[in-house]
Image (cartoon, coloured by chain):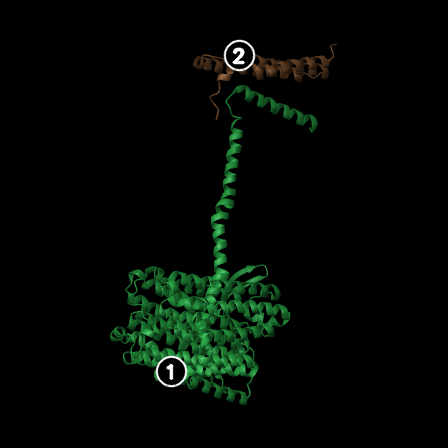
């Protein structure tokens, strides 16, 4: 059996990559993809711990997370497309209307 | 009958309220008579209280009626109550009786006044406050009245607040001076009350009197000296008498009522009321006696050289109050109150007479411009002469008996004080007859004024005659050896020492000699224009500038107290307030604004920054759970 540590480390790596991506990328679509990455890394952690403790709750929760991720992507992309119609760019640095 | 005592306060309150609320819509005469009726009714109540009290045996002549509990804070209990005893009833009768006469007189005197309603409102308010002062059974109630009369005095002195002249400056400033100088005395009263409560646990006169013997002599002395400060403020003694001469800026009936007959006697009344405390402190009584005597002498010397008739009377009042305070300091409470009563009669009479003269001369009171008025104003002249005789202590007028009672008390106890008092009595006779002779006798000095002088209307002269009759016969209240008034009042204070017959007779004879000698000097110098008084007083002539400049007291106060205070106030107003106080407030505002400027940078609208904040928050929560969860 693959040691659980490996799964957790992999998950952490993927999460970090996703987080850094969210913070430093300019394209809104890429940021969405990074957010998906973070969510999926969490899914990996849940499944790994579920296998270790022989508790199916972890795997069930993965389904919940996937459903939420799907819904979130749908809404988020809808907002992005609406914004793109208006601003003609997906550069998030240009979305700065709600400032002081 | 005692359950009617509340009417004493109800009548003036009703009068004041009606005049305040609807006075402008009533004709002037109605306002005046309504106010007078209120005080006359109060006088009726006082008379009924007198008769009810006389019927009781001496031990029972202290009736307390509590109307409600004013303050209850733990052990600090102050009732709203009156003490009906000989002393308070005597004072109430003087206040309402003389007050009623002055109200009636004012109807005539103030007939041309535009702010008629305000005047009578203030007068009724004053009567209410003064009655509160004298009838209250505890220090705090008395203090409410004390402050009330101070307020009424301020309002009435500065009644013509928009007037300014050479004698007084802005009349409003005279009111201010009275109020502020009085405040210093009030401070003394307050600290004394604090000490009394903290050492004896009560502020009710009866209880304080019963417990007074438990006071340590040092504590009693401090309390009494503070009370003396309070009395000096209200009763115009050294060092706080300076407001009274300036108070003459007010209408003359006000001078008669407040600054001769009633308010200024509040200090003396207070000293008699608190006799139990004074008896615990021999040094404080000695200080009071000396302050009274010195004030009497100082004021008499100044009155000798004043040229304004009202100012002569004002300094005379300070002097006579000195006699009363001196008597209280000597323990001669009966004599002090007797002189208070007779002085109320003849001084109010004299002031009202001066008002009558002002009426005739259109406000001119410089005696160097008057003269010969006795032919034009017979009633005013005769009543003024009667008042003068009483003031000078000419037998058998009432002033002789009351002043003599005080002189004999000082002769019995304290010879140096007696010498000062006797000298003052002589000067009193001189200056009072000087005022009479220069104003009413001789050739008129200003023909134009003399031509237009006329007697005052009856509404003004009838009160004069009533007071004159009282002045003549009030001596009977307390003749030597018989002393009915003193015996009646004794239940309110301690038993009065019997003075030996020899001392009494000697005192009477010296008083008679001094008063007639003073009359003779004034008659010779001012009527017959003889020279011997001048040669007699030539060795003392160097003192004249000192007297004329009122011993430079006002100037000293101005330099030492007023100017530094004004400088400090000015510094506070010009430097401290804008720079420090406003600076602090503005700094708070500026700090808020700068903080806002800094914090505002957070909200820059850039999504990555917001994402980073979320990230930081998550990290923080994680760390928390890692290390503390």
Q: Which dot marks residue B525?
A: 1
Mark 1, Cα crowd under 10 Å, few <14 / some 14-19 / many 20+, is some
| Depicted B564 relative to depicted B92: above or below | above
Q: Position of residue B309 (x, y in %)?
A: 37, 73
Tell whether B10 sits left or right of B501: left
Q: Chain of mark 2?
A: A
Locate residue A10: give its quadrant.
Answer: top right
For the point 63% across and 69% down, which residue is it? B218
Q: Position of residue B598 (x, y in %)?
A: 53, 30
Tell whether A94 sits left or right of B120: right
In the rendered image, is residue B95 in sight?
no
Tell whether A82 sits left or right of B623: left
Q: Position of residue B599 (x, y in %)?
A: 53, 29
In front: mark 2 or mark 1?
1
Q: SS class of the residue under badge 1?
A: helix
Of all chains in the rendering, the one displayed in green is B
For the point 46% across and 15% down, which residue is it? A83
Nearer to me, B10 or B235 = B235
Locate residue B277: give its quadrant.
Answer: bottom right
Q: CA distance from mark 2 to mark 1?
A: 120 Å
| Depicted A2 relative to depicted B358: above or below | above
> What colour do you see for chain A?
brown
For the point 73% across and 10% down, which residue is it? A2
Q: Chain of mark 1?
A: B
Mark 2, Cα crowd under 10 Å, few <14 / some 14-19 / many 20+, is some
Q: SS class of the residue under badge 2?
A: helix
In the rendered image, is residue B112 in sight?
yes
Q: Residue furthest top?
A: A1
| Quadrant position of the N terminus of chain A in the picture | top right
Q: Position of residue B83 (x, y in %)?
A: 50, 71
Q: Which dot marks residue A29?
A: 2
């Amino acid at each position: 059996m693959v040691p659980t540590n490996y799964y957790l480390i992999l998950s952490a790596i993927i999460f970090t990559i996703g987080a850094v991506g969210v913070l430093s990328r300019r394209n809104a679509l890429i940021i969405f993809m990074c957010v998906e990455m973070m969510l999926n890394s969490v899914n990996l952690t849940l499944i790994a711990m579920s296998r270790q403790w022989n508790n199916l709750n972890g795997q069930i929760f993965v389904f919940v997370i996937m459903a939420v991720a799907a819904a979130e992507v749908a809404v988020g992309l809808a907002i992005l497309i609406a914004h793109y119609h208006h601003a003609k760019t997906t550069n998030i640095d240009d979305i700065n209307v709600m400032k002081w | 009958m005692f359950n009617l005592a509340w009417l004493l306060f109800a009548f003036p309150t009703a009068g004041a309220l009606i005049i305040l609320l609807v006075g402008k819509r009533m004709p002037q005469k109605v306002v005046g008579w309504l106010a007078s009726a209120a005080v006359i009714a109060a006088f009726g109540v006082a008379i009924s209280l007198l008769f009810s009290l006389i019927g009781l045996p001496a031990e029972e002549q202290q009736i307390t009626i509590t109307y409600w509990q004013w303050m209850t804070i733990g052990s600090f209990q102050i009732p709203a109550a009156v003490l009906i005893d000989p002393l308070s009833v005597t004072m109430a009768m003087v206040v309402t009786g003389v007050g009623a006469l002055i109200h009636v007189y004012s109807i005539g005197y103030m007939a041309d006044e535009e702010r008629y309603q305000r005047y009578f409102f203030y007068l009724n308010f004053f009567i209410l406050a003064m009655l509160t002062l004298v009838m209250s059974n505890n220090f705090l109630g008395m203090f409410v009245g004390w402050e009330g009369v101070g307020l009424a005095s301020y309002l009435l002195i500065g009644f013509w607040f928009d007037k300014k002249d050479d004698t007084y400056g802005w009349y409003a400033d005279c009111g201010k001076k009275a109020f502020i100088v009085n405040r210093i005395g009030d401070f003394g009263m307050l600290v004394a009350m604090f000490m009394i409560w903290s050492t004896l646990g009560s502020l009710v006169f009866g209880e304080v009197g019963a417990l007074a013997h438990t006071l340590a002599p040092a504590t009693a002395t401090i309390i009494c000296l503070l009370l003396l400060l309070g009395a000096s403020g209200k009763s115009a003694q050294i060092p706080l008498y300076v407001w009274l001469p300036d108070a003459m800026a007010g209408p003359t009936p006000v001078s008669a009522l407040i600054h001769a007959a009633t308010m200024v006697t509040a200090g003396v009344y207070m000293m008699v009321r608190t006799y139990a405390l004074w008896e615990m402190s021999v040094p404080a009584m000695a200080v009071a006696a000396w302050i009274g005597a010195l004030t009497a002498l100082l004021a008499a010397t100044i009155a000798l050289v004043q040229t304004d008739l009202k100012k002569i009377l004002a300094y005379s009042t300070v002097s006579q109050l000195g006699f009363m305070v001196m008597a209280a300091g000597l323990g001669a409470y009966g004599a002090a109150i007797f002189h208070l009563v007779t002085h109320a009669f003849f001084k109010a009479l004299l002031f009202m007479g001066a008002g009558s003269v002002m009426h005739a001369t259109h406000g001119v009171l410089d005696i160097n411009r008057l003269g010969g008025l006795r032919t034009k104003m017979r009633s005013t002249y005769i009543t003024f002469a009667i008042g003068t005789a009483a003031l000078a202590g000419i037998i058998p007028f009432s002033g002789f008996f009351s002043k003599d009672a005080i002189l004999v008390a000082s002769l019995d106890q304290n010879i140096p004080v007696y010498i000062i008092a006797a000298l003052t009595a002589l000067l009193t006779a001189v200056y009072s007859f000087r005022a009479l002779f220069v104003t009413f006798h001789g050739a008129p000095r200003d023909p134009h004024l003399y031509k237009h002088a006329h007697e005052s209307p009856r509404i003004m002269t009838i009160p004069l005659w009533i007071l004159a009759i009282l002045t003549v016969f009030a001596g009977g209240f307390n003749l030597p050896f018989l002393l009915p008034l003193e015996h009646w009042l004794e239940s309110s204070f301690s038993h009065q020492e019997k003075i030996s017959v020899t001392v009494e007779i000697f005192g009477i004879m010296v008083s008679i000699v001094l008063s007639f000698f003073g009359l003779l000097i004034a008659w010779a110098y001012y009527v017959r224009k003889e020279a011997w008084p001048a040669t007699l007083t030539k060795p003392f002539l160097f003192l004249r500038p000192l007297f004329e400049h009122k011993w430079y007291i006002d100037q000293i106060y101005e330099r030492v107290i007023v100017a530094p205070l004004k400088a400090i106030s000015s510094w506070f107003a010009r430097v401290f307030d804008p720079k420090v106080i406003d600076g602090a407030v503005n700094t708070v505002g500026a700090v808020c604004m700068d903080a806002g400027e800094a914090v505002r940078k957070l909200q820059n609208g850039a999504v990555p920054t917001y994402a980073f904040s979320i990230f930081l928050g998550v990290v923080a929560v994680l760390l928390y759970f890692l290390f503390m969860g």
